[in-house]
Amino acid sequence: MSSLSIHNPATGEKIAEVPADDAASVAAKALRARAAQPAWAATPLAERKACVERFREGVERDLEALAVTLTRETGKPIRMSRNELNGLLARLDFFVGMVEPVTASETVWDEDGMRERIEHVPLGVVGNISAWNYPWFVGCNVIVPALLTGNAVLYKPSEYATLTGLEIARLLHQAGVPEDVFVPLVGGGPVGAALLEQKIDGLFFTGSHATGTRIAQALGSRLIKLQLELGGKDPTYVCDDADPRAAAESLADGAMYNAGQSCCSVERVYVHEKIHDAFVAAFVETVKGFKTGDPLGEDTYIGAITRAAQLDVLDAQVADAKARGALLHLGGQRLPGPGNWYAPTVFSQVDHRMELMKEESFGPVIGIQKVSGDEEAVRLMNDSRYGLTAGVYTPDGERARALLSRVNAGTLYWNCCDRVSPRLPWSGCGDSGLGLTLSTYGIQAFTRPRAWHLRQP
Ligand code: NAD
């Protein structure tokens, strides 16, 4: 059997070597999941819910050790790893609390001896290919409602978050989910590709647009449910009546949290010319206050860049912005290793000729563009192939509503950013994806409605 080496991106050190899957083991696991799924679907919902509740207890019990593992394999600052795990607990509560009302069968017609009912049945065996940046969140957004609704799950964590993926598996199995019902697959792209070859009833993917479209093409002739949660280039507009300092503090956090490696990181900022200079000054001052360093340090705000390859993307965006006349206020280069480090970087005087304002940075790099007013801001916010989130900062709720309703995005923020709620659907327009997770819709996504026509004899 082959193996996968895991490295700490903050130090470059190898921290683990784990057995990896290959095409043959993926095929064997898929067959076992197929055989195990009917019994799981027939397990009373109360028992499936009890499994997730015991999983929650395990996460809460082991939270500190799980946070350290996540920090060591991704370079995420330890406080943010704890935040992710604590946030997960609330998501689990939501799923457990809502699965019954959302998937209960309902009679929608009952007249003259004729009854019509809708029943929600599991899809069957679903594949989940996942990302590394919030592996607990993006993994469990799929895994947990899929299991609660009676599916078996073949789960391929990112090769950059495999230890966390294996911890998810350990805790689910300890909580009573059968080993053939929740099945981790270890490895990189080829193992994900092998999963696509199996007989599956749905594929739920979180990752880049490039991989997402490759997966869509691979599954093109297969009529199975496909969801793609992809990247973004999320814009925010700060209006002339906003408090520049308050907006700058909020948006600096939205751009730099987790070193900008969030799908909903603020990636483009447009500021009304009246308050532009005050905003930029406050933004730069806020970012200067963020401590970069050892991800295990309690006061660290900016940790390592998880994938070394992303450093090249950041370098290229920075060089292109400089060459096209952007004004660099802070950062603009890698930090010395070992490990993968990038200085928090702030540009103003940017425009849409620059890659920095067009393609996902997925790092601690941000461009701030001056605009003359609301019309220009809306036009620029929509000038993107992505559409994950968008925000407006203004005290005027009506103005925010009017502006945001014209922006193509799955999620809209008024005076906030970089925020996800279990109660709201998480979805993207355009190249940000297909389908959704979270909310009641994100539970139903793992079922198929079945229609019953019942005539009383
Ligand atoms: P990625 O596309 O590089 O990898 C994602 C997964 O796909 C990994 O598990 C990888 O092993 C697998 N994979 C790679 N090639 C494959 C192939 N040919 N067939 C099948 N599987 C394959 O993305 P990443 O670097 O892990 O994640 C970062 C990206 O994810 C960013 O673009 C980010 O915006 C996006 N993201 C989106 C959301 C969202 O909710 N919309 C959430 C988190 C991350």
Image (cartoon, rainbow, N blue to C red):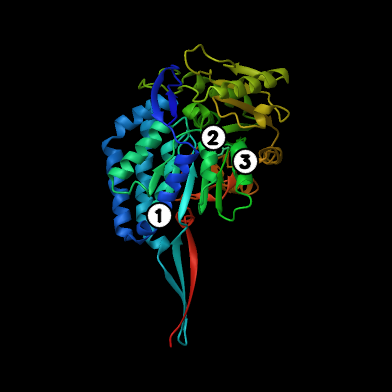
Foreground pick, 448 / 401: 448
Question: In the image, ligand 1 is in what quadrant?
Answer: top right
Residue at horizontal 55 percent and vertical 40 percent from the top: 193
> How far across and down, in percent of the image, does residue 130 sit?
49, 39
> How far across and down, in percent of the image, does residue 15 sit?
38, 22
Please, what secondary structure does the residue beneath circle 3 have?
helix
Q: Residues within 10 Å of mark 1 (few under 14, many from 20)?
A: some
Amino acid marked by disc 1 = Ala
Pointer 3 residue Cβ closer than 8 Å to ligand 1: yes
Please, what secondary structure does the residue beneath circle 2 have?
helix
Amino acid marked by disc 2 = Gly
> How far across and down, in percent of the image, does residue 76 sit?
43, 27
**Mark 3 or 1: the one toward you:** 1
> How far across and down, in percent of the image, does residue 190 sit?
54, 35
Q: Earlier in the sequence, mark 3 or mark 1?
A: 1
Numbered circle sitting on residue 214: 3
Residue at horizontal 56 percent and vertical 33 percent from the top: 266
Pointer 2 residue Cβ closer than 8 Å to ligand 1: yes
Please, what secondary structure does the residue beneath circle 1 have?
helix
Residues at marks 3 and 1, CA–CA distance in whole angstroms: 29 Å
For disc 1, the marked residue is 35
Residue at horizontal 50 percent and vertical 51 percent from the top: 200
Any part of residue 238 in sight: no
Numbered circle sitting on residue 189: 2
Numbered circle sitting on residue 454: none
**Quarter of the image containing the C terminus?**
bottom left
Foreground pick, 113 / 180: 180
Any part of residue 437 in sight: yes
Residues at marks 2 and 3, CA–CA distance in whole angstroms: 11 Å
Task: Give yes or no for contact between labels 2 and 3 (Cβ–Cβ under 8 Å).
Answer: no
